[in-house]
Image (cartoon, helix red, strand yellow):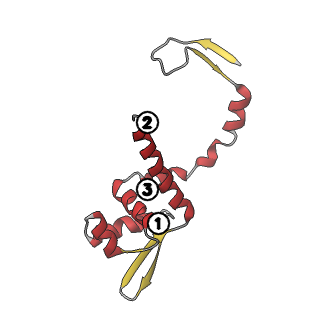
Amino acid sequence: MTSEKVSNLSKDTCDTFCYDEEKVTRIQAKIDQVSGVEMIFKALSDATRLKIAYALTLEKELCVCDVANIIGATTATASHHLRLLRNMGLARYRKEGKLVFYSLEDDHVRQLVSIAMIHEKEGIRHGR
């Protein structure tokens, strides 16, 4: 381990700078695997899109008009957000006559949203 004395600026940092060279090297070799994943979180970080994704965890499929009413927006706004979710690979659509129905792309997206909801609820219970 390499160490060096650093000033203590706050209680949430180490008083001494040291690191495990083997761990750091092993993890650095894999760290670029996160490339592109940030776009998933960026898409879901918008409150409207997260509401839409959450609604799609509650129902397997929703019409654009349903989504617009659920989020209290116009169909144009709902379509815009749904299109972005689709372009990011988080949702898919199908046409049925003049109607367009959206669903989540796969169970991974459903799990991401569901786990985030569970985490937030647990945080509230634990005094956050």
Label whose residue precedes the other's in the sequence (3 or 1): 3
Side of 53 relative to 27 (left or right): left
Tell me the residue at 43%/70% (across/down).
Answer: 59
Residue sticking out furthest to the bottom: 97
Figure check: 5 above or below 37:
above
Is 24 located above or below residue 49 in the figure? above
Q: Cβ–Cβ below 8 Å for labels 2 and 1?
A: no
Q: Say the numbered circle drawn on residue 43.
A: 3
Residue 87 is marked as 1
Q: Residue at x 70, y 40 (%)?
A: 29
Residue at the (39%, 67%) spot, across then down = 82
Q: CA distance from mark 2 to mark 1?
A: 36 Å
Q: Quadrant of the C terminus?
A: top left
Q: Which amino acid does the dot numbered 1 rest on?
A: Asn
How many discs appear? 3
Residue positioned most to the right: 22
Q: Amino acid at mark 3?
A: Ala
Q: Residues within 10 Å of mark 1 (few under 14, many from 20)?
A: few
Can you give x and y, in whole percent of width and height, for residue 62 in the image? 40, 73
Q: Measure the alpha-carbon separation of dots 3 and 1.
A: 10 Å
Q: Position of residue 39 (x, y in %)?
A: 49, 53
Name the image quarter holding residue 53.
bottom left
Give the image quarter of residue 124: top left
Nearer mark to the viewer, of 2 and 3: 2
Q: Quadrant of the N terminus?
A: top right
Q: Alpha-carbon neighbours of circle 2 within 10 Å: few (<14), some, or many (≥20)?
A: few
Mark 2 highlights which residue? 126
95 or 121: nearer the viewer: 121
Q: Few, some or many C-alpha atoms within 10 Å of disc 3 (few <14, some 14-19, many ≥20)?
A: some
Q: Secondary structure under badge 2?
A: loop
Frontmost of labels 3 and 1 is 3
Residue 74 coordinates in the image, percent (x, y): 25, 69
